[in-house]
Image (cartoon, rainbow, N blue to C red):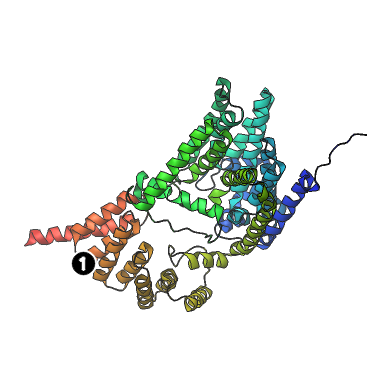
């Protein structure tokens, strides 16, 4: 009889899988009762493109853009859902949750495949699964592209690991097909070749010519589909934030430390993050963020040769996050959903830090399960608490309105009746009357309802409480315009421009105010600046025409005199 030591029951992979599945479902069960929110209604519930899976309709389904992106597999998956569930969002939510569970299990499998201990793989996969930053990706049906693209990405990476061990044409074809499926679901998965190269260096301690050659077909496919996404759709009209690639990059640099903060302490999550545009590289926030990113990149390169596996996970975080930093412009500068794939890297590094601590201080080993368990419970509870935000449009609007001043009264999440929204804001103001954003949002509703005097009063309170908030200055300036007070509008809008120089709407409304004051030269400067920032926006020509009429009138008056 063999004297074989039995492994502790808590190291069982079957147990790990069961706990990951069960706890993930518990964390996100509340999402199954969610309604259509935000653009779900237009892109899914009322989208005629999803109505038919007939062979004759598939070419149209697979060649259509999901504005502004070409992501046909996401569209196809939703069409299948519509065929199964019709207009009931519950089934769509179930599919999103199942895909998220599958991704958590694939993260666990990937870490085991890369040689991580069962305990570390379990802890990382479980924390990744229940981390509240993923609520937006899982509970919002329209973010199907996030959960589905990561499924294909992880499957492609696992297939590549097999190909790296035993190169076979069939295995590579599988890698390539899965990678293309990921690209056809969300283009940010284009970074897979960089991850495979990093793997070869960090785990195989080599970079052969054939490893580089293996990435070439993937790079070609990625470049082709990226080109289609950027140029194949005439409606793809995203502009650089602030009208400049440098403003966008400076601003995006300040987002990275905020993401790290959300990884470590996922509180204060928002459906929309106010990210002020940055005018100079020398601003303290920009300078500190840029230096931190550069230090992380240099550390990754150094570790790639000294402690290569740690370097790999830093590279994972930076590379998978890079496409979400507006290197190609898109509307949102920051969002929780952008951490869906990058989050794996920091969690692995945290697990390694804990293991290193245990090696140095063996007595700490008894505290590790307790601390890890507490982190899992905390993340699960935060996720359960966050999920109802995506239950319906009112709750989504409320989260936005109570956390940021960067909204307007006609925000698409708000319903046709503004009574509930105003009651919500007044209750919040009663609890905290010192919040500029709350007064701003109440004033924005008054403005939209045509109660201009009330809007000016409420927005003036907001501006007094938050004089450094460019969004509040902009809203107050616009209210002054409609109140027939162009001089007050100019003063406030000039403050908005000073606070956020690349603000399109501040310059546009400033041009309107100067027109009312009869100051054609300043109106021309303001409207020209607005065109520089957003050359294609629809409300620009009318203001330019007003400026041109004023200039013509003044020239005629001068000639007549």
Q: Where does the N terminus fall, quadrant-wise?
A: top right
Quadrant in the rendering for residue 103: top right
Rendered view: 468 above or below 369: below
Rendered view: 129 above or below 401: above
Q: For the point 35% across and 62% down, which residue is it?
A: 470
Q: Residue furthest left?
A: 561
Q: Where does the C terminus fall, quadrant-wise?
A: bottom left
Q: Nearer the viewer, residue 511 or 296?
A: 296
Quadrant in the rendering for residue 292: top left
Q: Nearer the viewer, residue 84 or 253?
A: 253
* Neighbours of disc 1 within 10 Å: few (<14), some (14-19), many (20+): some
Image location (x, y in percent) of residue 355? 64, 44
Rendered view: 288 above or below 418: above
Task: Report whether residue 385 is seen.
Answer: yes
Q: Residue furthest top?
A: 209
- Residue annotated with mark 1: 517
Image location (x, y in percent) of residue 493? 29, 64
Q: Nearer the viewer, residue 162 or 122?
A: 122
Q: Secondary structure at mark 1?
A: helix
Task: Report whether residue 87 is seen.
Answer: no
Q: For the point 67% across and 44% down, which residue is it?
A: 120
Q: How many marks?
A: 1
Q: For the point 54% across and 59% down, which residue is it?
A: 269
Question: Going by the image, does 18 lie left or right of 152?
Answer: right
Image location (x, y in percent) of residue 105? 70, 45
Image location (x, y in percent) of residue 404? 46, 64
Question: Going by the image, does 499 lie left or right of 2?
Answer: left
């Amino acid at each position: 009889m063999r004297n074989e030591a039995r492994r502790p029951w808590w190291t069982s992979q079957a147990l790990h899988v069961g706990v990951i599945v069960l706890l993930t479902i518990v964390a996100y069960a509340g999402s199954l009762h969610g309604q259509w929110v935000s653009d779900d209604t237009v892109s899914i519930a009322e989208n005629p493109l999803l109505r038919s899976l007939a062979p004759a309709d598939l070419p149209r389904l697979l060649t259509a853009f999901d504005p502004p992106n070409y992501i046909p597999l996401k569209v196809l998956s939703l069409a299948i859902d519509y065929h199964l569930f019709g207009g009931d969002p519950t089934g769509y939510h179930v599919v999103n949750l199942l895909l998220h569970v599958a991704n958590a299990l694939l993260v666990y499998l990937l870490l085991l495949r890369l040689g991580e201990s069962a305990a570390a793989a379990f802890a990382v996969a479980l924390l990744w699964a229940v981390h509240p930053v993923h609520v937006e990706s899982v509970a919002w049906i329209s973010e199907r592209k996030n959960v589905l693209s990561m499924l294909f990405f992880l499957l492609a990476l696992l297939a590549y690991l097999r190909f790296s061990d035993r190169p076979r044409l069939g295995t590579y074809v599988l890698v390539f097909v899965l990678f293309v499926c990921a690209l056809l679901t969300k283009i940010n998965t284009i970074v897979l070749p960089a991850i495979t190269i990093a793997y070869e260096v960090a785990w195989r301690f080599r970079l052969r010519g054939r490893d580089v050659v293996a990435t070439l077909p993937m790079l070609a496919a990625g470049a082709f589909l990226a080109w289609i996404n950027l140029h194949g759709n005439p409606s793809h009209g995203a502009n650089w934030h602030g009208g400049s690639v440098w403003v966008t990059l400076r601003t995006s640099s300040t987002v990275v430390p905020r993401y790290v903060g959300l990884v470590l302490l996922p509180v204060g999550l928002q459906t929309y993050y106010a990210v002020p545009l940055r005018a100079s590289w020398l601003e303290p926030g920009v300078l500190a963020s840029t230096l931190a990113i550069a230090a992380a990149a240099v550390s990754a390169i150094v570790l790639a040769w000294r402690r290569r596996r740690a370097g790999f996970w830093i590279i994972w975080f930076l590379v998978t996050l890079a496409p979400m930093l507006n290197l190609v412009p898109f509307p949102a500068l920051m969002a929780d959903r952008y951490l869906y794939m990058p989050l794996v890297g920091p969690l692995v590094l945290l697990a390694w830090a804990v293991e290193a601590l245990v090696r140095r201080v063996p007595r700490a080993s008894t505290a590790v399960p307790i601390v890890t368990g507490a982190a899992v419970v905390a993340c699960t509870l935060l996720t359960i608490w966050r999920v109802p935000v995506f239950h319906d449009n009112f709750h989504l609007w409320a989260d936005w309105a109570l956390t940021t001043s960067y909204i307007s009264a006609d925000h698409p999440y708000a319903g046709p009746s503004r009574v509930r929204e105003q009651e919500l804001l007044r209750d919040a103001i009663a609890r905290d009357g010192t919040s500029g954003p709350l007064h701003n949002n109440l004033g924005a509703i008054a403005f939209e309802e045509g109660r201009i005097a009330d809007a000016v009063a409420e927005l003036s309170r907001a501006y007094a409480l938050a004089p450094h908030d460019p969004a509040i200055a902009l809203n107050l300036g616009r209210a002054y315009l409609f109140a027939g007070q162009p001089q007050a509008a100019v003063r406030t809008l000039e403050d908005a421009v000073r606070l956020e120089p690349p603000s399109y709407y501040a310059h546009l409304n400033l041009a309107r105010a100067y027109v009312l004051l009869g100051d054609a030269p300043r109106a021309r400067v303001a409207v020209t600046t607005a065109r520089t920032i957003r050359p294609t926006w629809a409300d620009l020509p009318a203001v330019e025409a007003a400026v041109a009429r004023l200039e013509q009138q003044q020239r005629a008056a001068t000639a007549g005199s």
